[in-house]
Structures are given as C-alpha cells and as structure tokens.
Amino acid sequence: MDTLLVYAYQVAFSFSIFILISLGLAVIFGMMRVINLAQGEFIMLGAYACVVCTAFGLPLWLAVPAAGLIVGLIGIAVERTVIRFLYGRVLDTLLATWGLSLLLVGLVTTLAGPQSQSVPADLGGVSLGGLQVPAYGLVMIGSALAMLVGTYALWRFTNLGLIVRGTMQNPEMARALGTNTSMIYMLTFGFGSALTGLAGALLVPLFGASPTMGLFYIAKAFIAVISGGPWPLLGTLSASGLYGSIDGIVSFAFSSVLGEIAVLLVAILMLRLLPQGITGRLRKGL
Amino acid sequence: MGWLFSDFRRPAGERPGPVWWSFVVVATAVLLSLPLTLDLAQLLDLSVVFVLALLALSMSFLWGYVGILSFGQTAFFGLGGYVYAVAAMNWGDTTLPFLLGIAIPLAFAALLGVFMVYGKISDIYFSVMTLVITLILNRAMRATSGDQYVIGDVRLNGQNGIPGVPPLQVPWDSSVTLFIDHVYYLSVVLAVLVYVGLRLLLTTPFGRILVGIRENERRIELLGYDARRYKFAAFALSGGIAGLSGTMFAIWGNFVAPEMFGLGQAAEVIIWVIVGGKSTLIGPIVGTGVIQYLTSWLGTQGVGQVTLVLGAILIVFVLLFKDGLVPTLGAAIARVFAGRRESGGGGQ
C-alpha cells in the first residue's frame, strides 16, 4: 500500500513536470503552430528571473509570478522582432528559434557564468501513508493543475479566449471581422512564453538554474505536444499523463535515464501507431 | 565569362559539364598538394573541415534535394564514431570497424525510416522527432559513466568520452597506421568522392525522383512512384554518410564523446549548411570551412561567445540570406559577368 502511494506520488510528480514544461509549448506550437525551439531557453530564462528576483529580496511565491511576467514580456519582444516575419514558414521558424536558443544560452553564460544557481524552498516534508514526500513536490503538482485549468478556462470561457481561438482557426475571417490578428498573435505568444517562464521559475528550487538547462526539457515538451495531437490542451494533458506515468514508474523502478529512453521509445511507437496524435481522431477542439 | 558559371547553375537533374569536372579535378589537385606547404597543426585543422564536410553533405543532400530536414544526422555521426571506437578498441583491427561505422548508422537510419517515413509523419514532425532522438541518445550516452557500462573491453565513460581511439590501419597491412597527413589525404578524397557521387546520383532517375519529391510529393505519387521508398532510401544513405563522417571524426581526433550527439553539434551542422547554401552541394563544404575557422577563432576570445555568435548568425541567415553564401555570391558574380542580362535564383 505504501509503495503504491509512493508510486502514485512519483507518477503525479512526473506528470506535473510534463504539464509544466509542455503547457507553454501547447499554446505556442499546439495552437499557433509556431515551432519554438527556444522553448527550453524560455524555461531557463524563467528560472534565472526567479533567481534574480529572490536575490533582490522577493519571497519565492512572489518571485515565481514575477518570473512569468518577465518571460512573457521577453516573449512579446521575440515575437515582434523575429517570429512575426516567419508565420507560415514552419521550417524557418524552427531554425530561427534554434538560433535564438543558442543566442540566449550564450548570452546567459556570458552574463551569469556557466555554473548552476538555486533558490531554496524550505517547506519540509509531508507524511503520505507513513512515507515522507517533499511538500514542494505537492506544490508543483498543484501549480501544474492550476495552470492547466486556468489556461483551459481562459481559452474556453472568456471573450478573449474566443477571439484567440477564432484567430488561430481562420486569421483571414478574424481580420475581416475587425480583429487585430497581429496583436492577438503577439499576445498569445506572450502568454505561452509567460506559462513557460512560470514553469521555469517553479522548477528552480528542485533543479536549479543553469544556462544549458533548457536542453533537458525541450525534448520532453515536444514529445508531449506532438503525441498529443491537434487538441493542444487535452492532447498535452493526455500525453503528459501517459509519458509521466511511464517516466515516473521506470525512473522509480530503475533509473531516470532508462525512464527517458522508455519515454522516447513509446513516443516513436506512438508516432507510428497514431501519427495524428492521441486526439487525432477527435473533432478539432481545445 | 558567364559560361564559366553556367555549369554550376544547371538544375540538379542535368549531367555536369566539362567546366564542373575540371573544377573538381583542379580543386582536388590543389587540396592534395597543400601538405607540401602547410605544417601538421594547420593540416589537422583543415582535415577536420573535410571530415565534417561529409556530415554537412549528408544533411544538404537530404534537406536541399529531398526536402527533409533531419536533425538525426548528428545522431548517426555520433553513432558512427562510437561504433568505430568500440569495435576498433575491442578487436585491434580497424578495417571492419571502419565499415561498421558506416553500416550501423545506415541500419539505424533505415530502422528510423521504417517508423517515420513509412509512418507518413509530416516533414516538420520528422525534423522534431529526429532532433528528439539525437537528444535522448546524447543523454543516454552521458549517463554511461559507471563501471557497468562496458561493451567488450571498452568502458563507455559517460560524459568523458572514450579516449585513445586507435588510428586507422592500412587494410592489407595492420602494422601500418595512418598519420596526420594520411588522414588529411583520406578525408579530402572521401569528401570529393561523396560530393561527386551525390552530384552524379542526382542525375540518375533515382535522384530526379528525389528532387521531384522535394518539389511536389503528391504529384510524384500520382505519377505512380512510391515516394516513401525513395525517401527511405535517401534517409538511409545520408545516415550512412553521416556515419562515415563520425567514423572519420573518431579517427581524426582519436577520441569520441557524447558531444558528438549533442544539440551544439546538431546546430553547427545546420549552420554550415544554411550559411553555405543548401541548394548546392559545394556550399555546405564552404560553409563548414568558414564556420569551423570562425568558431575556433571565437573559442580563443572567451566563454559563451561562440554559441552567442552562432545563434546570431543562424537568425540573420534565416531572416535575411535564406539562400546562403554560395548561391548568393554565385548569383551576384554571374550577374556581373552576364552584364545583368538575366538573373535566376540560386545556382547549382
């Protein structure tokens, strides 16, 4: 029973990491079809923003949203200077954002040095069926769910969400109806970046911040969003659930590297069996 | 003077003319006589350009002529290096390991091709999935630092890589090993052979169909060709070439490390090809040389700046010079000589 609980915690934890790192990509790639290879570096920027904010004396629970805001603004700047010119040119977007990713890694290495930095989150442990699990892990699981539900609610139930979804579905029609689609693209990209920055900031107490940390997340994020299929949020959720479980169980039973390899193998198999993604057979939706 | 360039501006399907052939012969002769004037350190720097040019060629063939951008080239490159290293260190002999360094990446590419080409995933997912595979291989190789990760007698050593990879021996006499200048000759010859081979391959019916797939895959299928078979074959072939490059890299440096699979390596290949111009086969070779010398110069300037500059170069070329150096310069020169009579797009 206790082992089962620990497994459940481990799965939920892996699941929440998958959700955190792929939610921003689900918006930017899943909804906007912009392949952003600098996504991992946005996570890194979020982490560094969090480190800097706490260094200025902000408590962690304030530094995390502040980091999200900062990365959101950076995302808007990137959209205006690079991405804007590349809509519809998928491959060029991929290459330019890769250039951006290298540029950001180089920039942060030059400014902050190559060493890893961290922010402590001393929340202690919580007893779960006689076993201690770190309380911060539960905070992460909660935040991941809150961000997912919040994003879903924003797109599904608000007027802005309606306009955004309409713009992504048919930009010409949206423009004909008087929407400033350029602005909507900018805001959506900024929102996706902000989610990514939040994720990076939330990960800092556990994994620290280093210039090349983006590398560790980018593969997982793309796997989750691609296998998710055309429904950005539901697809990402189900793919994160699947890969989170595999990663959690294999990592706990063997090693975290085997967990990652297992995830990759399943992802390739999934692509072969369900090339349209998990939600490929469903009618298009969120 | 315009006729001088017309040979380079032919479409890929046409047979190259005498000017191109004389260019190949002259360039090869010049390159092979360089050891007379260069010292060993310079030769070593130049060898790696041609070793890596093989990798760039494998990518530009697939990307520029078949229209598939595969980041997996880096994976095949690393795999080739590791296969050669492990096999040569276990067996002592190097001929079979050299061949395996080509064959195993080729087989791995074929295996991936079965899943991805025959799975009919779209081009962009193909790019992303090959990138993911490269990353995972890199991470897996990094994690092999313990004593338990041994193939035969060779420890994989994780992040530190495998030092002391044996130099290549002459196949008929294992007591003779290749020295720095021999490795240079071999890499020049291999680069020229692969360049000429790919150029001629593109003039065959097989090559023309590949270019047709790039232009319009649906139309090729409607004409009755199974596009998947051709893409699969091209992918496997380019995997083999990338493996050859990795094998030569291991021989060149006597060393393999997980960085061969890394994102940095993958990015550099893309940058060579983009900067040189992917619509040509000669461009990537030029791009490899330019960027390779640029990075080694930058490397002496400080930490972090290499990736910064490479990233900026990539963004600038994608946004402003999509065709790359060689086609852009070629078109400009041809325009000057042709007296602005006519100007086409990129050259061949």
Image (spheres, coloured by chain):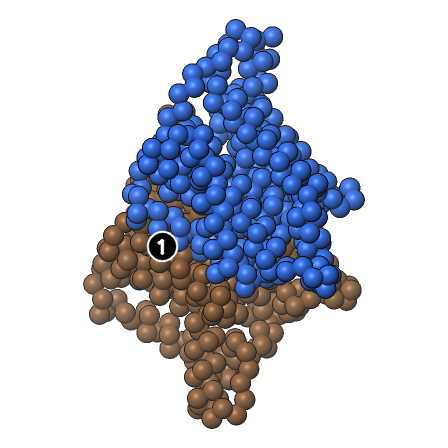
Chain colours: A blue, B brown
Left/right of residue A192 with respect to residue B146 in the rendered view: right
* A9, B7: nearer the viewer: A9
What count of labels does the image hold? 1
> The N terminus of chain B appears in which quarter of the rendering?
bottom left
Q: Name which residue lies at 32% across and 46% down.
A: A109
Q: Residue B193: percent from the left, percent from the top? A: 46, 65
* B266, B234: nearer the viewer: B266
Q: Amino acid at mark 1?
A: Leu
Q: Name which residue lies at 67% across and 33% down.
A: A238
Residue B336, picture quadrant: bottom left
Q: Residue A116: percent from the left, percent from the top? A: 33, 35
Q: Is residue B286 above or below residue A251?
A: below
Q: Which residue is mark 1?
A: B308
* A127, B168: nearer the viewer: A127
Q: Residue A233: percent from the left, percent from the top? A: 66, 39
Left/right of residue B309 with respect to residue B194 in the rendered view: left
Residue A112, picture quadrant: top left
Q: Judge whether residue B25 can be spotted in this image.
A: yes
Left/right of residue B328 with respect to residue A147 in the rendered view: left
Which type of secondary structure does the marked residue at label 1 adopt? helix
Residue B329, picture quadrant: bottom left
Q: Residue B268: percent from the left, percent from the top? A: 41, 55
Q: Is residue B180 above or below residue A69?
A: below
Q: Judge whether residue B74 can be spotted in this image.
A: no
